[in-house]
Structure formats: structure tokens, C-alpha cells
Image (spheres, helix red, strand yellow):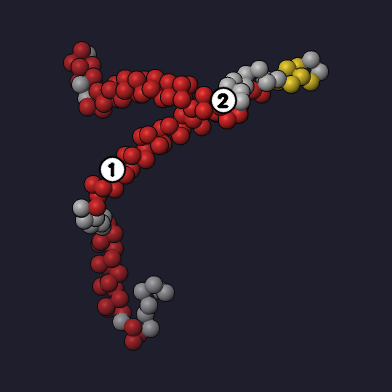
Amino acid sequence: MLKGFKTFVMRGNVIDLAIAVVIGAAFNAVVTALVADIFTPIIAAIVGKPNFADLVFTVNKSQFHYGLFINAIISFISVAAAIYFFVVYPLNKLAERRARGQEPAPTVVPDDIALLTEIRDLLSQQVGPAQGGDAQGA
């Protein structure tokens, strides 16, 4: 039982996943700080209000805190923008630069498709166009 557990833990996928979780947690702190310390003050300077949490309207003594929703939307868009512009976009550009010097990999036709293509070609040679046999129309 312990040997099986050791095999499970030592798999590459489990170790990679553990590393990804730790790096993801650290990256979350960086992105959260970027949003809270840079993006939010910029929005506050433009809009004139750093926090929308106090925006509320009341209907029949029920309060609707739509400001919290606005804060959540701004936070989500800010995090998504930070991830895209500081991680995804630079990595895509790096991948493009690396791919420029390489030829595209030839497409590999699966064996079953190659066999079906060969059968189709042999059948079209046997029937021939003079006999009215169209391999695709038949």
C-alpha cells in the first residue's frame, strides 16, 4: 500500500501540479497587488471614487449594494487584463519568435485515414471514369 502511494506521489503529473499550485498562489499575490496598488488608483483618479462599495439603492426597505458588484467587475477585468498583458501576450510573442526559424511540422495522416484513401484510389482506378463510376457520387 505504501509502495503504491509512493508511486502515485512520484509521478510527474502530481509533482507538476503541486508546483503549479504553489506558483499560482504566489502569482495570485502579485496580480492582486498590481490590481489593488496600481489599477484601482488609476480608476479612482479617472472616476473620482476609489471604492464603489457604498453605492446602494433601496426598494421597500431592501438595500441593493450594486457598488460591490461594480467593484467585483472592475477587479475581474483588472485581473484578466493583467494576466493577458503581462503573461499571455508576452508568452505568445516569445512563441512566435521561436517558431519563425522552424518549419511547420508535417501533418501526420492516421493509419486508418491513409488506408481508406488508398482503398478509394484503388476503387476509382478499377471503375474508371468511362464507365460512369464516380467514387464520390456512388
Location of residue 115 with respect to 82 vertically, above or below: below
Residue at 66% over, 17% down: 54
Q: Amino acid at mark 1?
A: Leu
Location of residue 57 with respect to 109 vertically, above or below: above
Residue at 28% over, 22% down: 19
Q: Amino acid at mark 2?
A: Ala
**Which one is in front, 107 or 82?**
82
Q: Which residue is mark 1?
A: 94
Q: From the top left corner, tell me how far across and down residue 62 is, in percent.
A: 75, 16
Q: Quadrant of residue 16?
A: top left
- Image quarter hosting the N terminus: top left
Q: Quadrant of residue 53?
A: top right
- Image quarter hosting the C terminus: bottom left
Q: From the top left corner, tell me how far across and down residue 98 is, in percent.
A: 23, 47
N-terminal label among 1 and 2: 2
Is residue 108 visible in this depiction of the protein? no
Residue at 31% over, 20% down: 22
Residue at 70% over, 20% down: 56
Q: From the top left corner, tell me how far across and down residue 84 is, in percent.
A: 41, 36
The disc at residue 44 is: 2
**Which one is in front, 20 or 138?**
20
Point out the residue furthest to the top here. Answer: 2
Mark 1 Cα shell of 10 Å, populated few (<14), some (14-19), many (≥20): few
Location of residue 118 with respect to 134 vertically, above or below: above
Mark 2 Cα shell of 10 Å, populated few (<14), some (14-19), many (≥20): few
The kind of secondary structure element at disc 1 is helix
The kind of secondary structure element at disc 2 is helix
